[in-house]
Amino acid sequence: MSRRRELARRMDALSDIAGIMSAMKGLALMEIRILTDFLASQQRMVAGIEAAAADFLLTHPEFADEPVAGRELCVLVGSEQGFCGDFNETLLTRMEARCKEEDAPVRWLVVGRRLASRLGQRECVELALPGALVADEVPAVLLRLTRDLGRLLAQAQLAGYGLSTLYHCDATGDIRMRSLLPLRDLPAPGNPSAYPADLNLAPEVFLRGLTGHYLYAALNAVLYSSLMAENRQRQAHMDRALQRLDEDSARLRLTYNIQRQEEITEEIEVILLSTDMLNEG
């Protein structure tokens, strides 16, 4: 009886765990639906700004610039919570590879406390910030990120550094290194014109304003894309875990039934033995 009770207790525990995992999977699916519209809108905005920047630099090539090799501040976007498979581990692998590629050490700004805890204390990490748990928290994370980026890039030791970001891109399904500042790696202009655009501002003023809008929109899209990819991985992770739980529960149920049958057989044997003893008496 004690063996069967232990099996029953374990089955109840697995059932409770499955309920929690199902709830987590449901939350991930809900976030994916919410993020779908946000991400699509943000990507359209970024594409529009990039097209405008490409047209501007085509007619004003004197403003095109490239950062000094190895002088790069990179925003590494990981997860704020766990249960998302190897989401952070793959980012760390790419980070290590990126550091080895450059002549000078890359400086990092980490977003996501779960990822930051995996990194520990490293000299190359300038700052670690909390990330977003859900889509509604992205604006607050973006505000902190842009504020701290402005403060870091204003420091003398980071003067002249370019800005890029390393994150999980939901559109491509892999990890993407995306250059942000100075404006580079832009798409080719759609309709090159022999005449420059008619600006109402001085070119340098226009570029400064465009750069600010682009940075804000691009980082917003990056945060949404990373959170979308994280929730997709969490959903897949929960699916695999629930499948394993179902398999474990099925094995326990079979063992429980076998144990119960053995106990019933023993009870029947005891009853028959008692009847034989009474008849003999």
Image (spheres, rainbow, N blue to C red):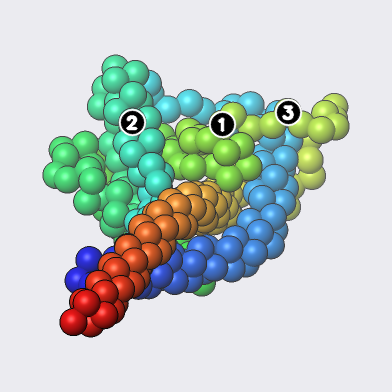
- Taking the view exactly as shown, the residue that stands out farthest to the front is 280
Q: CA distance from mark 1 to mark 2?
A: 25 Å
Q: What amino acid is found at the position of numbered circle 2 in the picture?
A: Thr
In the rendered image, the quadrant that contains the C terminus is bottom left
Q: Secondary structure at mark 3?
A: loop
Residue under label 3, please give it. 188
Between marks 1 and 2 in the image, the one whose residue lies nearer the viewer: 2
Which numbered marker is on residue 184? 1
Residue under label 2, please give it. 93
Which numbered marker is on residue 23? none
- In percent of width and height, residue 278 lies at 23, 82
Q: Residues within 10 Å of mark 1 (few under 14, many from 20)?
A: some
| Left or right relative to 155: residue 258 | right
Q: CA distance from mark 1 to mark 3?
A: 11 Å
Q: What amino acid is found at the position of numbered circle 3 in the picture?
A: Ala
User: Is residue 114 shown to the viewer in this render?
Assistant: yes
Contact (Cβ within 8 Å) of mark 1 with mark 2: no
